[in-house]
Amino acid sequence: DIIFIFILILNFRVQTPKNGIKIVKNKGIKFGRPCFKVTEEFIIYCEKYKQGETTINDIKTKFGISKTTFYKYMSIIDS
């Protein structure tokens, strides 16, 4: 009996977050980090980077992105 109750409690704990996430997603609320939007200002800074007028660290700080994200979007702009 005690083991059965324990299993029920564990099962409830696992199911509750899943149900909550499902309900929130159905309401249209998104999870995770927001996508980076490429702006004209970002494109200008990419050009400045190519000309050696600014650094990656300056761009990372200004736009709040990682080095990987910078290179990803810079390659998209170049192609």
Image (cartoon, rainbow, N blue to C red):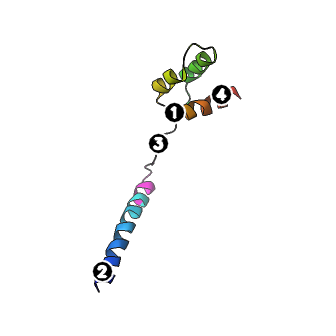
Q: Is residue 73 left or right of residue 4?
A: right
Question: How many angstroms separate mark 2 from mark 1 (CA)?
Answer: 47 Å
For residue 31, side relative to residue 7 (left or right): right
Q: Earlier in the sequence, mark 3 or mark 4?
A: 3
**Mark 4 crowd level (few <14, some 14–19, many ≥20, 10 Å Cα):** few
**Residue marked by disc 3:** 33
Amino acid type, mark 3: Arg
Q: Which residue: 55% across, 26% down? A: 39
Q: Label 4 belongs to which residue?
A: 77
Marks 3 and 4 sit apart, C-alpha to C-alpha, by: 22 Å
Among numbered discs 3 and 1, the one appearing first in the sequence: 3
Q: Judging from the image, what secondary structure is the residue with disc 2 in?
A: helix
Residue at the image point whose x is 38% and y is 61% from the top: 17
Q: Residue 75 in magenta?
A: no
Instruction: Residue 5: give its label.
Output: 2
Q: What label does residue 66 carry, if any? A: 1
Q: Amino acid at mark 1?
A: Ser
Q: Residue 67 is drawn in which quadrant? A: top right
Q: Residues within 10 Å of mark 3 (few under 14, many from 20)?
A: few
Q: Are marks 3 and 4 in contact (CB under 8 Å)?
A: no
Give SS at disc 4: helix
Q: Earlier in the sequence, mark 1 or mark 4?
A: 1
Residue 59: x %, y % from top left: 51, 23
CB atoms of marks 3 and 1 within 8 Å: no
Q: Residue furthest left?
A: 2
Residue in the picture at 63% in, 14% down? 51
